[in-house]
Image (cartoon, rainbow, N blue to C red):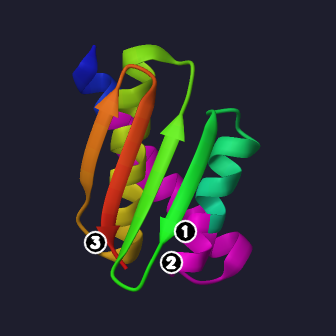
Amino acid sequence: DDKTLSDVAIRAGSLEAKEFILFKWKELNLQSVTDFIKIFFNVCGFGRYDVVEDSSKVVLSGHHDLKEKGSLYIKYFLESLIRTSLDKSCKTTITEDSVTIEFQS
């Protein structure tokens, strides 16, 4: 169900992903988090992604073939990661095959 999916995604984003980032890069910052997201999409097979950064915001867009549940998982996972690692709130838009997350840089 959606509650279980969100719980698992939030835990993975706030704990496991954060621990991996600290192990690999030894610090939590915008660069280490975006490097992790690159691995999340490219190596873990979650789809394709794009990151656009400027002086005021970061926009992450991911496209996948995992349907609606996949979009929900990625949404909760990335929001949790960004909130707990960077202390940033997100504006998120999802479709059946994409997730776009915007937050202040």
Q: Nearer the viewer, residue 39 or 22?
A: 39
Residue bounds of the magenta highlight:
7-34
Magenta region includes residue 12: yes
Q: Which quarter of the rendering shows the N terminus?
A: top left
Residue located 33% across and 82% down the image:
56
- Specify whether 76 is left or right of 81: left
Give the spatial CA distance, label 1 vs label 3. 12 Å
Rendering quarter of residue 17? bottom right
Q: Is residue 87 above or below residue 103?
A: below
- Specify whether 50 is left or right of 105: right
Mark number displayed over residue 88: 3
Mark number displayed over residue 30: 2
Residue marked by disc 1: 33
Residue located 64% across and 47% down the image:
40
Residue located 31% across and 33% down the image:
94
Pick whichever of labels 1 and 3 is earlier in the sequence: 1
Instruction: Check whether the beta carbons of the residues at disc 2 and disc 1 lie within 8 A of each other.
Output: yes
Give the spatial CA distance, label 3 vs label 2. 10 Å
Q: Secondary structure at mark 1?
A: helix
Q: Residue 3 at what x, y percent from top left?
A: 23, 25
Give the amino acid type for the residue marked by disc 1 in the picture: Val
Q: Residue 43 at what x, y percent from top left?
A: 76, 43
Q: Secondary structure at mark 2?
A: helix
Give the amino acid type for the residue marked by disc 3 in the picture: Lys
Rendering quarter of residue 34? bottom right
Mark 1: give few (<14), some (14-19) or many (20+) Cα within 10 Å. Answer: many
